[in-house]
Image (cartoon, rainbow, N blue to C red):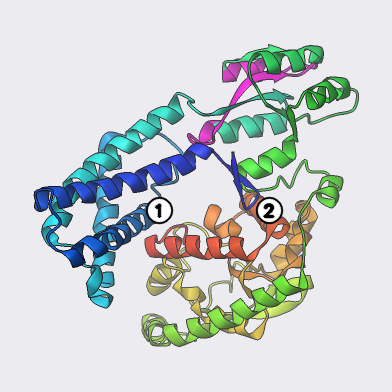
Amino acid sequence: MLKFFNTYYPIRNLIFFLGEGGLIFLALLIGITIRFHGQVPHEAMRHSVWLRVLAITFVVQLSLYYHDLYALKSAQKTFDLSVRIVQAIGAACILLAAVYTAYPALILDQGIFFIGLFFLLAFLVSWRFGYQYVCQQGIMSEKVILVGSGELATLICREIGENLDSGYAVAAVMDSRGGASLAQRLGVNHYADYDTMCELALDRGIRKIIVALDEKRGNFPAEALLRCKTAGLTILDGISFYEALSGKILAKGTLPSWLIFSEGFRRHAIRKAAKRLIDVVLSTVGILLSLPLMALIAAAVKVSSPGPVFFRQTRVGQREKPFEVIKFRTMRQDAEATCGPVWATEDDPRITIVGRVLRKLRLDELPQFWNVLKGEMSFVGPRPERPVFVAQLKERLPYYGERHTVKPGLTGWAQVNYGYGASEDDALKKLEYDLFYIKNMSLMLDLFIVLKTVQIVLFGKGGR
């Protein structure tokens, strides 16, 4: 297993990605061979062709990523997959046209590209269905023994089962107090005797044991786990495993002691200074680049409905200090005159026609560059919430107040993984992602979140 940002990725993901890059490269080389009958036409072409093919490979894979074609959650039908690949390649062609305009030296002969395109489509569809078969058959999936059969164990099994490419397979369930029903649903054996744990793992070539007991008192198999540990097996705590598997930390069911003694929550002075410098640079560039667009949005908001262009609202910031967030107004001026503070809902009647477009594309958030520049917000962090909702959620959700140990952000780990929240249940699910971010925050994770945010904005996902 590979581990990035404290999240597990199967090593076959890397093989899949590199293999696909190699096939894209090969398709273009076949195009060159056919176009020039196996002969590269002149010396200059021979030296630069590799760079040109690499550029196309990079752009195509970037487009596949932004079309969610590397998020293999479930099996796909031939037609649906083919359509999405064609869309991704179409977007890659548009991007390549822009690259060629800026750097004409990278242009590959048109005939080569179109010949290679045929092989490219065939290779991509075949490769992906082959990889999908590998995932469905559990080839290269790591087998684990799950100790426990309660809520935590069920959540782990659900996370593995709902993700075609999780890279894990539960081989057996062990629980002295039950668990046969969970094992039956998974189609694996249930064992009540912990003493057989080590022998079972070694006999079946299992190297990892997940301890996911909801209640450990009187049910913790210390001796059996110690034998497994000294035999060279890896023993993982269920909550830690769930964190690395799902990219979130369970809010309900996680003891304060786990948060206290777990790694993470580091706040290095250099990292904080670098994060602030990046915030200043990005917000300044964002304001300058978006000024023409913001002028058009302001005019559209003003013309479409009566009221001010900008909407100011008190939100809770770092250390629970209130501040005024600035947004383009997307609702009627009297949106909460009768109902008071409420979450926005799907097809909310209070949202204006222009506001619906702005929310879908997240363009109503552009004025918050100013909040970032002032230091009230960061570019990446948990989204700031209104004081009335914060007061309610702190009473009902464990660890909700910990969100305010860092600056709120324009975008965040919860936003790129869960989308819009409009209920207490949504707030709990987003809190789990926010806790993961606060525990594992780094500049590289921030960069990854920004890239994911660009994808969401381009395709209008999650807006409301």
Q: What's the residue type where badge 2 is placed?
A: Phe
Q: Is the residue marked by circle 2 packed among few (<14), some (14-19), or many (20+) residues within 10 Å?
A: many
Whether residue 317 is visible here, answered yes or no, is: no
Q: Tell me the SS state at disc 2.
A: helix
Give the magenta part as a residue range: 161-186
**Badge 1: how crowded within 10 Å, few (<14), some, or many (20+)?**
some
- Residue placed at 48% from the left, 41% from the top? 13
Q: Quadrant of residue 234?
A: top right
Work out whether residue 186 or residue 60 is closer to the camera in this orientation and state it. 60
Decide: is 122 above or below 460.
Answer: above
Q: Which residue is mark 2?
A: 436
Q: Quadrant of the N terminus?
A: top right
User: Amino acid under label 1?
Assistant: Tyr
Residue that appears at 64% across and 33% down: 156
Q: Is residue 162 magenta?
A: yes
Query: According to the image, label 1 marks what residue?
Result: 65
Q: Residue at x 17, y 46 (%)?
A: 118
Residue farthest toward the right in the current orientation of the protein? 218
Whether residue 278 appears in this view of the structure is: yes
